[in-house]
Amino acid sequence: MKIGIVGGTGDIGEGMARRFSSKHEVILGSRDAEKAVSTSTCIIDHLKGRGQASHCTGVSNQEAVDRAEMVVLALPFAHLEGTLAGLSGFDGKIVVSPVNPMVKKEIFTTVPPAEGSAALLVQRMLPKARVVTAFNTISHNRWKDLDRAIDVAVPVASDDAGAKAFVMGFVNSIPDLKAYDAGPLEVSCMIESLTPLLINIARYNKMHDVGIKFV
Amino acid sequence: MKIGIVGGTGDIGEGMARRFSSKHEVILGSRDAEKAVSTSTCIIDHLKGRGQASHCTGVSNQEAVDRAEMVVLALPFAHLEGTLAGLSGFDGKIVVSPVNPMVKKEIFTTVPPAEGSAALLVQRMLPKARVVTAFNTISHNRWKDLDRAIDVAVPVASDDAGAKAFVMGFVNSIPDLKAYDAGPLEVSCMIESLTPLLINIARYNKMHDVGIKFV
């Protein structure tokens, strides 16, 4: 599969590309295509050092959208709206949002936009995209450290049953990730508020990169 | 310890009383003290049938507050404000809120009150109580089935460090429960939104009584 990562030079995007690019073609996008090329080179070198091939190419965010079968928005919430406003070509494509609207004050707190969640904001901006909420709670360290299984649950939400089933299948194809159907896109606010909760728990309990499991 | 359960004849309250009353004195309250007495008798019989003693007494909600060292508000959100308005004597007491403001539409959704969370509503109504958020995600079936370990994580939040440490100690004294410090009371909205998420996940994935663990 051709996976486009918008914001691929950020920590989350780079970590995803490390995980995905041995089995899939990753088209890693950035506002700065040159930076995407250098991040892509680093990823290929990193996997080569482990004796693995990496199918990763650095391009602009727009080219990542255009060439992908599935687009992942690996963006901090603060850059989500501005980045999407400058891009096109999402119609009919599966667009995965792992975005969590949150701020750090004394603690991390969820601050949903007027739409109710980042995913619903994405759906409002890209009305013809097949928007799916997934991967929200996975820290960049878990993505990046290929010596360690990620080993967490991934709640997945969408109003498009086919897109949801497709993304759940993709999640389950990644070793030690398990997808759970969390319902329609409306539930995304509850998924997106998990991440600030987990970050606070990590801090107050001297833990690192806390993930979630359903039991 | 003397644990008062306001709303003790509901499913959650009765389940808690089953778990707590072998090791603690449970003062099980209800608006209807007679109903509390009969629920209490059932709990004592149930534990007796298992060869265990139960220290459980059925009383009015007000008496449960008055006699308790720690009060648990085992109330549905819809009854929280009305019940608290008719009670007094909380000043200086540890008051545990496992309450989740949620509604069932097509799916379960979190609907926080103006204060931001059920716990903050409790703190506003009982300004001198030592309010602690805990036990939000544990289903009544998990509480009630004494043949099965509950075996989930319990995020705990409070602005009162002493009360939080006390409740965390109590949580950890229950076999297979593990308390996590989630921060100040302000984070309660994120804890309270876990439960509707878990109920939806149970429904969409054909699971039962889904709980959470942090990994």
Image (spheres, coloured by chain):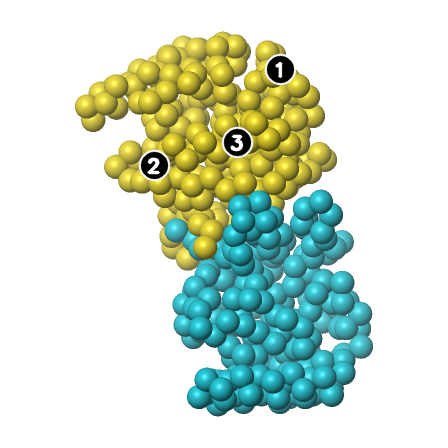
Chain colours: A yellow, B cyan
Q: Mark 3 or mark 2, which is nearer to you? A: 3
Q: Does the residue at mark 2 contact the one at mark 1 (Cβ under 8 Å)? A: no
The residue depicted at 71 percent of the width and 51 percent of the height is B104
The residue that mark 3 highlights is: A165
**Is residue B177 in view?**
no
Residue at (47% x, 74% y) in the render: B146
**Amino acid type, residue under disc 1 in the picture:** Asp
Residue B155 image point, x, y percent: 51, 60
First in sequence, mark 1 or 3: give its number: 1
- Mark closest to the chain's N terminus, 3 or 2: 3
Chain name for mark 1:
A
Q: Is residue B132 above or below residue A56?
A: below
- Counting every numbered tag in the picture gives 3
Q: Which mark is residue A175?
A: 2
Counting from the top left corner in percent of width and height, residue A86 is at 61, 14
Which SS class for mark 2?
loop
Amino acid carrying mark 2 in the image = Pro
> Do the residues at discs 1 and 3 belong to one chain?
yes
Question: What amino acid is labelled 3 in the image?
Answer: Ala
Residue B49 seen anywhere in this rendered image of the structure? yes
Whether label 3 touches label 2, CB < 8 Å: no
Q: Nearer the viewer, mark 1 or mark 3?
A: 3
When the figure is inspected, residue A48 is found, relative to residue B169, above or below; the finding is above
Q: Which residue is mark 1?
A: A91
The mark that comes first in sequence, 2 or 1, is 1
Query: What SS does tag 3 mark?
Result: helix
Separation (CA) of disc 3 from disc 2: 17 Å
Check the image and report above or below for A23 versus A212.
above
Depth check: A21 or A8 in front? A21
In the drawing, what numbered circle is on residue A37?
none
